[in-house]
Image (tube, grey):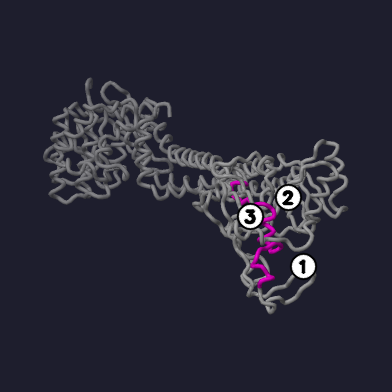
């Protein structure tokens, strides 16, 4: 292209591409996608890994009922997997009493308007470094604090109410809706906490139906009492059960049974020292004890190892597809140049330098490859900016 | 012949694998002269013009334009000389289909950095288009206009570089008789205004009247 006219090549090449824009758009789209997909998977996996690793690394120990360690971690850290086996509350109490560890209960089974209700204690906010953007922390039974994402997406603020979602429409004896008072909204944290509704674990137990409040049974007609066993009465449906905790009815809310048996889905354990941590890991060794203690970071490593193997396989497959796309593209260019043979002959007859003609041949290929690479790069850039937000938005 | 627009001497050319050979012992075209070359189809008229323009290279013999021995130049130099000094009007016009008429006329300036595209060149192209009566077509592509209009665009392209020699290969072949006369008249006018020598290949006897000289290629080969 030494004797070619670069400006002329751009002009003629541009005109040719403009005439062939449909074909060019197709080629650019195909190549950009071939470049984007493997990169997007790599970037995506890296972002998810960073996101998950950061939270798991910040959580020293997690105790839960025997089962899948990974599901336990997902429930305790990211509030997913609501159907994990439940852990009796007493286990956490015993750990705290015997070792002096701080035990933060997690009860993440129910939802309110599509967002996970996390029953916990105020220690959780301190542990995660969460602060309030507005309002106050929950102060009594039936109160809740919203994650920033929940508040934004539902348009709710302190003083509003949110109702827990019934889990089973036809199970009238089971989970029933509780209208919770929103006392505050958390500041954004860029984590799963933004997408959760936090309440005291006792409030979660009310939603579960273990605790409840109702009209005073003693004032009801005897016909309303179906069965009596000590202080426990089985009442029929004529007794009004409160669906919201208010200053007027809070005294009527009570628990049935031993609180030590009440369910948690997991509990975060913060041992006072490394020695206690090691003792706890030995005492609640997964596979042997009635409750399992796991290091979330270690459990996540197993997941990452699987994800990376899968990622490598997918990226290799997409790489192969991309190579095929390039070959097809090469064929398209070759056919295109064959169709342009007359045009190149005209230019040669006119006296166009061979460099100009070679430049015109190259222009289309370079344009398509460069534009595709640019588009893929911009898309990857946008993805890497958007991914952390998306991970939080989708409550990963 | 000093100052001749074109001189051919002892020219022999044969396409690879063909027995027929074009032989021209001597042909001189003076500067500004208008020469018509006739002959039956297949006698080598187009080949002669391509040799004269340096598109083809003879087996032996000389092709000289002005002081430049064209047949001795390498391909790149022949292309550069052709672009700068020779205006070509091809039988099929050889317009680039995706360019509009203006860009087709300015094509010699788009393909080589040896010919800078200046405002003066653009004005000249506009002026040529106006003289050829195609100003209204400048934004249109060859596919949108008639054969006669394409021929005029090809003519403007041949003249825009102000060549000293114009080679026209049956440029009226696809036109009706009235447009043939108009096209050749335009060719004569423009070539005379530019002071360029004109060599036109044709097999249409009615078009010979405006030429200074007429040669039959078979006779030229025999001489």
User: Mark 1 belongs to which subunit?
Assistant: A
Q: Residues within 10 Å of mark 3 (few under 14, many from 20)?
A: many
Q: Position of residue A209 (x, y in %)?
A: 69, 64
Establish whether labels 3 and 1 are both on one chain.
yes
Name the residue that disc number 2 marks: A105
Looking at the image, can residue A323 be seen?
no
Q: Which residues are magenta?
A: A193-219
Q: Residue at x 65, y 40 (%)?
A: A50
Please say whether residue A329 is one of the residues in the magenta stretch: no
Asked if both marks, 3 and 2, belong to the same chain, the answer given is yes
> Which mark is first along the chain, 1 or 3?
3
- The residue at which mark 1 appears reads as A231
Estimate the x, y position of residue B90 in percent, counting from the top left. 27, 41
State the residue lying farthest toward the bottom.
A223
Circle 3 marks a residue in which chain? A
The image's mark for residue A117 is: 3
What secondary structure is found at the residue carrying circle 3? strand
Q: Between marks 3 and 1, how big is the CA–CA gap? A: 31 Å
- Residue A73 appears left or right of B82: right
The CA distance from mark 1 to mark 2 is 29 Å
In this rendering, the answer to whether B18 lies above or below A111 is above
Residue lying farthest front? Answer: A219
């Amino acid at each position: 292209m030494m004797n070619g006219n670069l400006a002329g090549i751009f002009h003629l090449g541009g005109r040719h591409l403009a005439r062939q824009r449909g074909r060019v758009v197709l080629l650019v789209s195909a190549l950009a996608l071939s470049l984007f997909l493997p990169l997007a998977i790599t970037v995506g996996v890296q972002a998810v890994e960073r996101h998950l690793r950061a939270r798991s690394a910040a959580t020293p120990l997690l105790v839960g009922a025997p089962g899948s360690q990974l599901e336990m971690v997902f429930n305790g850290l990211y509030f997913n997997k609501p159907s994990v086996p439940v852990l009796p509350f007493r286990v956490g109490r015993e750990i705290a009493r015997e070792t002096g560890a701080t035990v933060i209960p997690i009860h993440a089974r129910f939802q309110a308007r599509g967002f996970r209700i996390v029953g916990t204690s105020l220690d959780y906010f301190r542990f995660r470094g969460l602060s309030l953007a507005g309002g106050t922390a929950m102060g009594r039974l039936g109160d809740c604090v919203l994650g920033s994402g929940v508040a934004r997406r539902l348009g709710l603020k302190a003083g509003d109410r949110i109702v827990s979602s019934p889990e089973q429409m036809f199970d009238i004896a089971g989970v029933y809706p509780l209208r919770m008072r929103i006392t505050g909204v958390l500041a954004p944290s860029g984590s799963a906490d933004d997408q959760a509704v936090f309440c005291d674990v006792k409030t979660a137990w009310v939603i579960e139906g273990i605790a409840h409040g109702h009209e005073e049974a003693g004032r009801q007609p005897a016909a309303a009492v179906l069965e009596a066993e000590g202080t426990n009465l089985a009442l029929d449906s004529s007794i009004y059960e409160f669906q919201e905790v208010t200053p007027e009815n809070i005294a009527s809310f009570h628990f049935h049974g031993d609180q030590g048996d009440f369910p948690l889905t997991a509990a975060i354990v913060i041992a006072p020292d490394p020695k206690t941590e090691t003792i706890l890991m030995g005492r609640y060794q997964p596979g042997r004890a009635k409750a399992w203690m796991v290091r979330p970071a270690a459990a996540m490593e197993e997941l990452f190892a699987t994800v990376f193997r899968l990622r490598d396989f997918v990226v290799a497959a997409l790489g192969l597809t991309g190579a095929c796309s390039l070959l097809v593209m090469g064929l398209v260019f070759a056919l295109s140049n064959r169709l342009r043979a007359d045009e190149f002959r005209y230019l040669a007859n006119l006296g166009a330098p061979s460099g100009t003609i070679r430049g015109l041949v190259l222009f289309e290929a370079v344009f398509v490859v460069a534009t595709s690479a640019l588009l893929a790069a911009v898309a990857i850039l946008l993805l890497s900016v958007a991914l952390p937000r998306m991970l939080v938005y989708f409550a990963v | 012949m000093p100052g001749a627009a074109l001189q051919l001497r002892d020219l022999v050319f044969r396409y690879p694998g063909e027995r027929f050979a074009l032989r021209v012992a001597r042909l001189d075209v003076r500067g500004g002269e208008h020469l018509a070359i006739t002959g039956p189809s297949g006698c080598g008229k187009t080949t002669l013009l391509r040799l004269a323009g340096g598109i083809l290279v003879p087996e032996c013999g000389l092709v000289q334009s002005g002081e430049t021995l064209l047949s001795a130049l390498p391909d790149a130099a022949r292309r550069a000389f052709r672009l700068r000094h020779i205006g070509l009007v091809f039988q099929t016009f050889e317009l680039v289909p995706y360019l509009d008429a203006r860009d087709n006329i300015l094509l010699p300036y788009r393909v080589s950095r040896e010919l800078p595209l200046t405002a003066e060149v653009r004005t000249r192209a506009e002026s040529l288009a106006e003289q050829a009566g195609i100003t209204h077509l400048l934004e249109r592509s060859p596919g949108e206009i008639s054969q006669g209009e394409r021929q005029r665009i090809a003519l403007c392209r041949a003249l825009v570089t102000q060549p000293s020699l114009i080679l026209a290969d049956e440029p009226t072949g696809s036109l009706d008789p009235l447009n043939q006369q108009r096209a050749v008249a335009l060719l004569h006018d423009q070539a005379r205004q530019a002071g360029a020598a004109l060599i036109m290949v044709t097999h249409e006897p009615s078009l010979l009247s405006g030429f200074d000289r007429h040669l039959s290629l078979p006779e030229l080969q025999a001489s």
